[in-house]
Each structure stands twice: as C-alpha cells, then as structure tokens.
Amino acid sequence: MTFKASVLTLYPEMFPGALGLSLAGRALEGGTWSLEAIQIRDFATDRHRTVDDTPAGGGAGMVMRADVLARAIDHASPEGDLRPRLLMSPRGRPLTQARVRELAAGPGAVILCGRFEGVDQRLIEARGLEEVSIGDFILSGGEPAALVLLDAVVRLLPGVMGNAVSGEEESFENGLLEHPHYTRPQEFEGREIPEVLISGNHKKIAAWRRAQSEALTKERRPDLPGAQPLLK
Ligand code: SAH
C-alpha cells in the first residue's frame, strides 16, 4: 500500500523540496509514498484568482476564503476518501510521535497549508479539518510545517529506514529522550568516550543508557511520561 499525500498550497513549488532528497526522496521515487501539490489558486473563480479577503470584524492581514478552499479540498479529497484532512495551524493539537505513527499506518493525508492570518473558521468545521501544530511558534505559512509532518511520517513507512530497530529506541517512543551517542575517535579534544560503552558488557551498557535517558528527560522534559516517578 502506498501512502498518498495531497498538499493544498499557494506555493506548490515548495514540494517535494527537502522530501525529494535522501531517504524520503528515494522512497518517493520508489513508490513507497506519493505526493501531489495542488495549487489552491486554481480553484478561485474570479478574474484575479483571489484566494483571500479582509477579516470580518476588522483587523490586520487577510483570511483565506472558505469557498475557494472547499473547492480545492473537494477536488483533492472527494467523498469516500478515507485519508484524514489536516490543517497546519499554530492553534492545532501539537504533533506527537504517537500521531505520526497513526498517520504512517493509514492510507495517507490531505494537508492544507495556511497563509496570511489563517483560514475561515467555517471551512474548518464544514470539512472536518484536524488542526495540527508543529510547535509554539508562528511560521509564515503551513508549507514548512507540512514538510516537517511528512518527513516524520515517511521515515516510518515500511522499508524507508534501513535499520528498523533504531526507530523503536528513539526519543519519545517510550516517553523518554534518547541517551547521548558517541563514535570514533576514542579521544576528541581531550574528551574520552565513556568507559562503559567500550566495555563490551551489553547489560551494563543498556543500564547506563537507560539511566542517561531518564536523567536527561527529568532535566529537560519533566512533562514527558518517562520523567514521572514510577507509582508504587
Ligand atoms: N494568525 C495566526 C497565524 C497565521 S501563520 C495565529 O495567530 O494563530 C500562517 C499559517 O502558517 C497558518 O495558517 C498555518 O497554516 C501556518 N503555521 C504557522 N505556524 C504554525 C505552526 N506552529 N504549526 C503549524 N502550522 C503553522
């Protein structure tokens, strides 16, 4: 099964962008996933191909029109399309590795990229859009957010990552941040690789990594499940 991504954007030239290279790019060429970038402006009906208008109630900036976006969405995702419809939005639920895994297990995603002040609220309700944020900061448009989301999803598709094990041990997969990594040379500017890692004792190594993970998570991300003291 191929994961099918349809991205609705005013800047289709931004795609596949970074996702045309490296692992994601190879998987795209190989047909593990597909990507279509749809120009929202093609669904405007007036002479000037207008996609936005001034905000009702006044204020700065422009708002993307519900009618134009609805036509674009209905074209990209006709009735019966089982893919979730996402709207990249700083007001959305923050993206998590758990949601990324769910998306990767599904048939694909229809992703709407906002611009200007955002999109008409009625469009979000009428088309059942799931608002997704990639963090508590404001981008100038949803395109980089869509690229981030797709990058996280595509690397989980079967066959994309060479070494499947590394995926399961990564940050967030178990509510913990990952332990630090080291590689040769053995000594770098006077700093040695921690002794235990070259001991060859796999049990000790696993325990050291686990302890490092827990300490790092407590210090940096007390909000993650792995930072909570175990309930007795
Ligand atoms: N006025 C809006 C911000 C608009 S930014 C507000 O204050 O909430 C323009 C577009 O960039 C948004 O419609 C959205 O598609 C995208 N965007 C900005 N920040 C984002 C974020 N953190 N996560 C996902 N999308 C984001």
Image (spheres, helix red, strand yellow):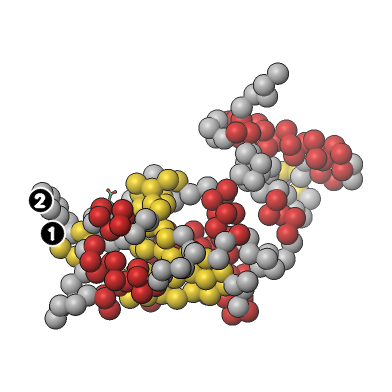
Q: Quadrant of residue 106?
A: bottom right
Query: Marks 1 and 2: in contact by CB < 8 Å?
Result: yes
Label 2 element class: loop
Q: Quadrant of residue 166?
A: bottom right
Residue 12 appears left or right of 213: left
Label 1 element class: loop
The residue sitting at 49% across, 74% down in the picture is 35
Camera-side residue of 84 and 194: 84
Q: For label 1, count other residues whose C-alpha is less than 10 Å away and answer few (under 14), some (14-19) or many (20+).
A: some
The residue sitting at 57% across, 35% down in the picture is 224
Camera-side residue of 19 and 51: 51
- Cβ(mark 1) to ligand 1 < 8 Å? no
Q: Residue furthest left?
A: 58
Query: Could you say where residue 20 lies in the image, as x and y percent from the top left?
Result: 53, 75
Observer able to see residue 12: no
Q: For label 2, count other residues whose C-alpha is less than 10 Å away and answer few (under 14), some (14-19) or many (20+).
A: few
* Quadrant containing the C terminus in the rendered view: top right
Q: Which residue is mark 1?
A: 54
The residue sitting at 63% across, 64% down in the picture is 157
**How many numbered marks appear?**
2
Query: For residue 197, which numbered disc appears in the image?
Result: none
Camera-side residue of 227 and 123: 123
The residue sitting at 59% across, 72% down in the picture is 2
Three-letter code for the amino acid on which mark 2 is drawn: Gly
Q: Which residue is mark 2?
A: 58
* Quadrant containing the N terminus in the rendered view: bottom right
CA–CA distance in space, label 2 to label 1: 7 Å
